[in-house]
Image: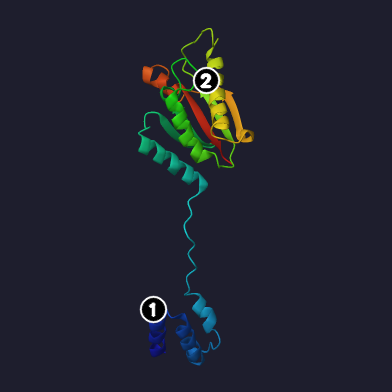
Amino acid sequence: MLLGLFIILYAASNIDVLKYEKMINAMGSVFGSEGAGANQVMSFQKEPTGSFEISPYDKIKQDVNNLIAENEYEGNLRLEENERGITIHILEDIIFPSGSAELNNGSKIVLSKLAAIIASLPNDIRIEGHTDNIPISSSTFKSNWHLSVARALNTAYFLIDSEKLSPDKVSIVGYSEYRPIETNDTREGRASNRRVDLVIIKQ
C-alpha cells in the first residue's frame, strides 16, 4: 500500500495525464477501484485559461487618461465614474472664452480627440452645461441658465456636425450653477464649476 501511494504521488507530479491514467487503471485492482482512473485524472486537470479582455468601461477610462497625460490636459479635463456612467469634465478655460458659448479654436481640437474615443460607442451621450454662481446678464444671455444650455448645445452640434457623433444618441441639458463639483467660495472652485460634461450613460 505504501509503495502504491508513492507511485501515485510521483505520477501526480508528472504533467503527462495520459500516462497517469494508464498507471491508475493498472493499480486499480490493488485499491479495489478499477475503472475509476479517468474520474481521478479529471481532478488534476486545470481549467483552460481564457485570454484577458479589458471591459469597455475600463477601455474608455484608459483612453481618456492617456489623452490627458499625452496632451498635458491635467488642469483641463477630469474623469469621474459613478452610478450614471463615466463623466468627462471639460473646464471652461479650454473650451469657451469667459461668458461666451462660442467654441474657441483649442476646444475643437480637444473635442475631436474625445470624439475619436466615444463616437463608436453604443452608449447614449448626455452633454451638460454648467456655470458658477456669479450671475450673468448680457445682451446675449439673460441668465446662467441660458449660458449653460447654449454651451451644451454648441458642444453637441460640433460633435454631431463635425465629428459625426450619432444624433440619436445625444441629449443636452443646462444646469446653470446648481450642479457644482467644487465650492463657489473660491476663484479656483468657480473656475472648475464653469464646464461642459460629457456623460457616457451606463447601459
Q: Quadrant of residue 79?
A: top left
- Closer-to-camera residue (21/16): 16
The residue identified by callout 2 is: 178
Which of the two labelled residues, at mark 1 and mark 2, occupies the earlier sequence position? Answer: 1
Circle 2 sits in a helix, a strand or a loop, which is it? loop
x and y percentages locating residue 94 in the rendered image: 42, 25
Which amino acid lies under the numbered mark 2 shown in the image of this protein?
A: Tyr
Q: Residue 154, relative to residue 24: is it above or below?
A: above
- Relative placement, left or right, of 85 versus 74 is right
Which amino acid lies under the numbered mark 1 shown in the image of this protein?
A: Ser
x and y percentages locating residue 188 in the rendered image: 37, 20
- Closer-to-camera residue (12/94): 94
Q: Residue 89, relative to residue 37: is it above or below?
A: above
Dividing the image into 4 quarters, which one contains the C terminus?
top right
Point 42% across, 23% down: residue: 192
Circle 1 sits in a helix, a strand or a loop, which is it? loop
- Closer-to-camera residue (3/117): 117
Q: Point out the frontmost of discs 1 and 2.
A: 2
x and y percentages locating residue 136 in the rendered image: 49, 10
The residue identified by callout 1 is: 13
Dividing the image into 4 quarters, which one contains the N terminus?
bottom left
Residue 162 appearing in the image = yes
x and y percentages locating residue 121 in the rendered image: 56, 42
Dot 1: within a 10 Å radius of its alpha carbon, few (fewer than 14), some, or many (20 or more) residues? Answer: few
- Closer-to-camera residue (119/196): 119
